[in-house]
Amino acid sequence: MESQQKKLDWHLNQVVPLSLDRLALGGFLIVLCLILLGGGVNFFSVAMVAASLVGCWLAGRQPIAALGLAKSSLFLCVLVPLAAYFVALPLVGLGAVVSEWACRFLGIPWEPQLLLKDFIELKNRDEIVRFFLLAVILAPLSEEILFRGFLYAWFKSFWPRWLALFITAILFSAMHQHLPVFLPLMFLGIFLGLLYELTGSLWTNIGLHALFNAVTLTVAMNYPDLVAVIGR
C-alpha cells in the first residue's frame, strides 16, 4: 500500500534542470553533426541518442538519471501511458481539427505525412514489420531522449517551465517537417512534457509515444481511407 501511494504521490516538478556549459553544449552539437554528416538522415535516431548521452556526460551528470531513464516500473512504462493515451487523444484530435480548418482556409493541401503514405503503399511483409519496429520502438525512444530528456531539461535550466514546454513542443513538431500535423504534434509535445514533469520517468513518455505511433500505423494499414493527419 505504501509503495503504491508513493507511485500516486506525484507533483508537477519532477524534472531536474540540466545545466550545460560550453564544453557540454559543444560536445552535444559536435557528436550530432558528425553522425549526421557521416551517416545522413538514416542515422538521425542514433545521432539524437548519442549526442544527448555525450552532452549529459560532459555536463557532469549521469546520463541515465539525467535523461529520466532511471525511474522505471510496469506501472510507469505500461499502465500510465495507456491511461494517458485516452487523455491525450482528444487534445491531439482537437489540434487536427483546427489544423485542417486552417489548412483549408490557407489553401494548404490536407494530406498525410510522406512517411505514412510510404507505409500504406508497402506490400512486403518484412518491410512492413521493419517500418513498424522503427516507428514504434526506435523513433519514440530517440525522440523522447532528445526532446524531453535532454532539450526540455536544458531549456528548463534557464527558462520558466511553461516556456521550456512550449519551445520543446514546437521543435518536436517542426522536426516532422509536415505543416498539416504541426499543431496536433505540438499539442502532443506539450502533453508529453507535462507527463514527464508529472512522473519523472521518460519511460512513460516513450510508452505513450510508442502507443500513438502504433495506433496510427495500425489504422493506416487496415483503414487507409480513414487515416487522419495526426503524425507519425
Image: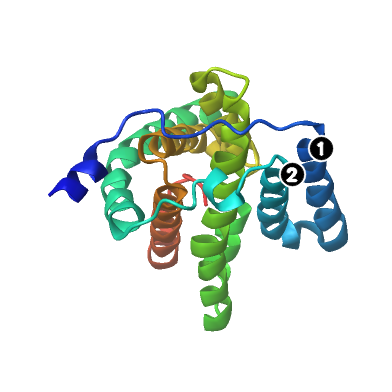
Task: Say if 58 sits above or below 126 in the image.
Answer: above
Observer-nearest of 179 and 35: 35
Q: Is residue 163 left or right of residue 57?
A: left
Res 58 label: 2
What is the tally of numbered marks visible in this picture? 2
Q: How is the image coloured?
A: rainbow
The residue lying at 81 percent from left, 55 percent from top is: 36
Picture quadrant where residue 154 is located? top right
The residue lying at 60 percent from left, 48 percent from top is: 62
Task: Say if 179 sits above or below 126 in the image.
Answer: above
- Check the image and name the residue furthest to the left: 1
Observer-nearest of 102 and 74: 74
* Residue 9 horizontal/vertical position (percent): 24, 36
Instruction: Mark yes or no: residue 108 visible.
Output: no
Amino acid under label 1? Leu
The reply to whether the C-beta atoms of the residues labelled 1 and 2 are less than 8 Å apart is: yes
Packing grade of label 1 (10 A; few <14, some 14-19, many >=20) is few
Q: Which residue is mark 1?
A: 23
Packing grade of label 2 (10 A; few <14, some 14-19, many >=20) is some
Amino acid under label 2? Leu
Observer-nearest of 95 and 212: 212
Distance CA(mark 1)–CA(mark 2): 7 Å
